[in-house]
Amino acid sequence: MLYRHVELWNARDKAAWLDAWQRFVPGEPMFEDPVGTPVRRGWDALAAVWDTAQPSGVSITIEKLIVCGNEAVALMANEVVIDGAPFVADSIEVYVFNQDGSCLSRTYMDPAP
């Protein structure tokens, strides 16, 4: 699912991106992005993430993915152009897929220089 998430994010296909998440996570999505901020919950909140982040033109790449049972950890490269210069911010994303169909994701971001 995480590779599909990246593929659809980078294709800028919001409807397919949300559909893929809803098929894989039939319960409630929850996310703490970045870690230390309040946990946001629900499909409207997930759609709002798209609406906030996509205009920046950020593209993501999975650098490393480790899956163990119902949990996954992804090292991500978040690439964007700022004032004409390319910038890459690393993040570590932790996903817990629960038996009730919900998913909690937590994103640890490398602060900007």
Image: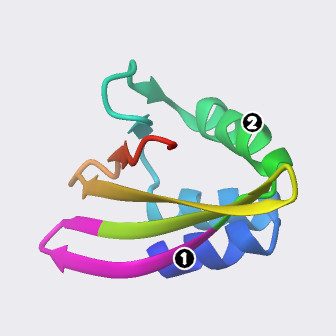
Q: Position of residue 12 (x, y in %)?
A: 82, 66
Q: Residue tagged by mark 1?
A: 61
Q: Give the Cα distance between marks 1 and 2.
A: 19 Å
Q: Is residue 18 visible?
A: yes
Residue 62 or 13: which is nearer the viewer?
62
The residue type indicated by label 2 comes to Thr
Above or below, 89 relative to 67: above
Above or below, 32 relative to 102: above
Above or below, 22 relative to 69: above
- What's the magenta region? 60-73
Q: Main secondary structure of the magenta part?
A: strand
**Relative to residue 57, is residue 113 drawn left or right?**
left
Residue 1 lies in the magenta-colored region? no
Residue at the far top in the pictured view? 38
Label 1 sits on a secondary structure element that is strand
Q: Residue 81, located in which quarter of the rendered image?
A: bottom right
Residue 80 or 102: which is nearer the viewer?
80
Q: What number is the disc on residue 52?
A: 2
Q: Position of residue 40 (x, y in %)?
A: 47, 26
Residue 65 or 82: which is nearer the viewer?
82
Q: Of the residues under marks 1 and 2, which one precedes in the sequence?
A: 2
Disc 1 crowd, CA 10 A, few/some/many (<14, 14-19, 20+): some
Label 2 sits on a secondary structure element that is helix
Q: Position of residue 11 (x, y in %)?
A: 80, 75
